[in-house]
Image (cartoon, helix red, strand yellow):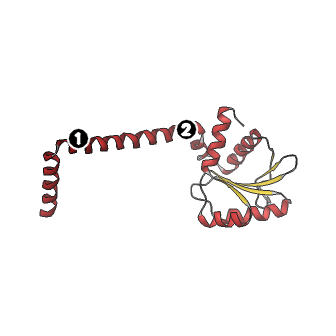
């Protein structure tokens, strides 16, 4: 306890001996605090504007419906698979020359390799050209590694929010 008091006394002596140092340190601390508050505020505004907070509360099937609308807005023809017997795909996207199977994962935790394994199987079953996993969260490192080796496109929270913001602004 004595060493703590000595440390405080030393700090106080330094701060009171050099008023300019004290003011500089205080200003630096206050600026850093204000910057952190501003960054957090802007992040919260972006979250609210994107609508991701509502997505986080959706049930799985509602999330699939939400993605259907979002992907239609991006120009895809979209159909939902049946609730049972979907072989790992929740949505099927098509363009003029491409067929894409998508697995939707609205999770509170990171998405693991099981989702990647399932969508790879679905790609073969549906004879698709591409396969995607879309989540409101992020992916584990093993999921990212497996996806890379199987050409699976991973759409995480950041990209999903970007798409949502583009839709909300009326962009493509």
Residue 128 vertical position relative to residue 22 in the rendered view, above or below: below
- SS at mark 1 in the image: helix
Instruction: Point out residue 34 in the picture as x, y percentages from the top left corner.
Output: 37, 39
Dot 1: few (<14), some (14–19), or many (≥20) neighbours within 10 Å? Answer: few
Q: Residue at x 76, y 60 (%)?
A: 88
Q: Residue at x 17, y 47 (%)?
A: 15
Q: Is residue 33 left or right of residue 79?
A: left
Q: Residue at x 26, y 45 (%)?
A: 25
Q: Is residue 14 left or right of residue 136?
A: left
Tell me the number on the disc at residue 48.
2
Q: How many marks?
A: 2
- Which of the 4 quarters of the picture holds residue 169? top right
Instruction: Point out residue 51 in the picture as x, y percentages from the top left corner.
Output: 60, 39
Instruction: Point out residue 166 in the picture as x, y percentages from the top left corner.
Output: 66, 37
Q: Is residue 131 left or right of residue 159?
A: right
- Which of the 4 quarters of the picture holds residue 118? bottom right
Residue 99 vertical position relative to residue 166 in the rendered view, above or below: below
Residue placed most toward the observer, 102 or 39 = 39
Task: Tell me the quadrant of the picture where the N terminus can be found.
Answer: bottom left
Q: CA distance from mark 2 to mark 1?
A: 37 Å
Q: Which residue is mark 1?
A: 23
Residue 44 visible, this orientation: yes
Dot 2: few (<14), some (14–19), or many (≥20) neighbours within 10 Å? Answer: few
Badge 2 or badge 1: first in the primary sequence: 1
- SS at mark 2 in the image: helix
Residue 1 visible, this orientation: no
Mark nearest the camera among 2 and 1 is 1
Residue placed most toward the observer, 135 or 158 = 158
Q: Is residue 26 left or right of residue 157?
A: left
């Amino acid at each position: 306890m004595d060493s703590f008091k000595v440390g405080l006394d030393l700090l106080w002596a330094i701060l009171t001996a050099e008023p300019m140092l004290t003011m500089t340190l205080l200003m630096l601390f206050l600026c850093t605090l204000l910057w952190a508050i501003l960054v957090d505020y802007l992040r919260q505004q972006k979250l609210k504007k994107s609508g991701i907070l509502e997505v986080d509360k959706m049930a799985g099937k509602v999330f699939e419906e939400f993605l259907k609308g979002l992907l239609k807005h991006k120009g895809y023809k979209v159909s939902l698979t049946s609730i049972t017997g979907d072989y790992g795909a929740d949505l099927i996207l098509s363009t003029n020359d491409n067929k894409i199977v998508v697995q939707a994962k609205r999770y509170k935790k990171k998405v693991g390799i099981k989702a990647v394994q399932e969508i790879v199987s679905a790609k073969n079953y549906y004879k698709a050209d591409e396969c995607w996993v879309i989540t409101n969260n992020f992916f584990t490192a093993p999921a990212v590694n497996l996806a890379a080796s199987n050409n699976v496109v991973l759409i995480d929270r950041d990209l999903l929010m970007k798409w949502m913001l583009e839709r909300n602004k009326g962009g493509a």
